[in-house]
Amino acid sequence: MQPYPSSIDGSGIRASSGNGKLSTDDAINTGNNNTDDQPINFQIVDMYFDIISLGCPIIQRSVMMDIISKNPLMNSNAPEEVALMYAIQANCYQRLGRKIEGRTAFNTSRKYLSQVFDLLDNFAIAGTFMYLSSFCMGEAEFNQSRYYLSSVQFFVAQNKQRLKDNIHFIHLCKTFMYLQLLLEEEEALDILSEEMKNSEQALHTNVVTTEKLTLQVYHFKKMIDFFMFITQNISDGQCGSSSNLSPSVPPPQFSSTMEEQLIQNHIQMIYSIPSQFNRSRSEASGTIRQVTKLMYLLMIDGIRLGILTKSQTQSDDVLIETANRIADFTTISYFSYLPPHVHTTVMNAARIHLSLIKQIQRGERISNGVDYYEYLRKEQRALTLMAERFTIVEKRFKSLLPLINEELMKRDQQFEQQIHSIIQTQQLQNQLLAIIPDDVNAIAQIHEIIGVKDVDLNTMNSYADVTRISLNIHTVPDSMGQDPFAVFLSPSFDINQVTTSPLSKENFYSDPQQFDPNNL
């Protein structure tokens, strides 16, 4: 098998346009010796095969390692190979959130590509255009992305008969078709997102969201059709079978309206066995399987949200369950490596949770004890992470971000107030203990001052108990319940009725003048 088509023939000579040959001695000798260029990182090899390629690499691992090991900045490598490496590196850095380095790699790839871009049948150049298009799509540069994809489309049309049996050409066709559909959907979603920026209807009605949101999911559905389509073996643009055990997935049919039959197709697709998991490749790894699986699950649940929001039946519980599951998916470590288009699913789930919180606040829905704020916080974290990586997510998320931040800020303030109230209560209790200590010695001093003796001052008695005992404070008899002052006005009133000890003239509470005959 060739490392990749139209790059190296059997004699080791690099192929150029037409039937001519470009020897290594005639390779580029200007621009490659610039030591200011960003070096190629060896780690992009593993990341490309595990994440960026989505299981459809257009170049062999050994060829990539060979190109990088030759230090393309210092040696006479073909510029199209260097351009391809930098285009792949730009996508890797973009997926890691290293925007500046990603843009630098993108510009470096363009610099090398500018010297050979008119070689019409060179596979490496077509691959470079394809990955440059993917990078531009993540940066919301749709016109630039479409320009690069049109060059790939021209290469495919010119070479599909000659290279139809080459596995790397098949992988390039799959990825190209996937990016082409993705670009179409991103452009449509971009228009819908602009229209939805000033619309708060989805946040003030029932869980069933706006028709425009449903259209967003509908456009997203077409992409998952293609996701299943490209993971099968294709020849000349026709869909083949990825496994003898699973039926072929037909090419997606695009229509301008969402009909009942389309809804049924959605449901059938969700519960069918995805054909891409039946494929086997020699370079498949656990990372490829997990990233692809997580991407697939998010896309499927994104479609499920579209179906449920369009349903006329009572499907709130299933809708909420799906949104909760999407939020949980974002906490998986592989989420940070997913392509930018999955942000649509996460944003729709965030709108669902935002709507639920608003309904509970307005009293339209009874709180069932589920912390929707926590789900919303997960989605905020996930979208913020993707916005740091992809400009397209940053643009679309900025209209929803203030609404999410407002609700989470309210929640945090309520939590802080509760904590502050608990702290204040505890501090008040501590202050009271400091002002009125439960001190037996202090009680003894009080007894000494008022002349009370023979009081048991054990540590088991509280301050209030001992004080009441020493001052002979007793409850009023039951006979005083109806008219508490009648007994005092009665001629037969006896002070012994309300005290257990004889009244002493030295009592702190007696008035000496009251018993002085000279004052009568």
Image (cartoon, rainbow, N blue to C red):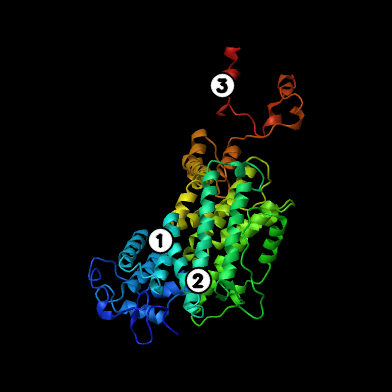
* Residue at figure coordinates x 58%, y 41% from the top left: 200
Residue 27 pos. (x, y %): 27, 76
Residue 439 pos. (x, y %): 49, 45
Identify the disc placed on residue 505. none
Name the one closer to the observer, 161 or 100. 161
Q: Is residue 77 above or below residue 90?
A: below
Residue 356 in view: no
Which element type, helix, strand or loop, lies under badge 3? helix
Residue 5 in view: yes
Residue on which the image places disc 2: 173
Q: Identity of the amino acid at label 1?
A: Gly
Say which of marks 1 and 2 sits in front: 2
* Residue at figure coordinates x 60%, y 44% from the top left: 203
Badge 2 crowding class, 10 Å Cα cut-off, few under 14, some 14 to 19, many 20 or more, is many
Residue on which the image places disc 3: 512
**How far apart, in angstroms, are the residues tagged by discs 2 and 3?**
113 Å
Residue on which the image places disc 1: 97
Which element type, helix, strand or loop, lies under badge 2? helix
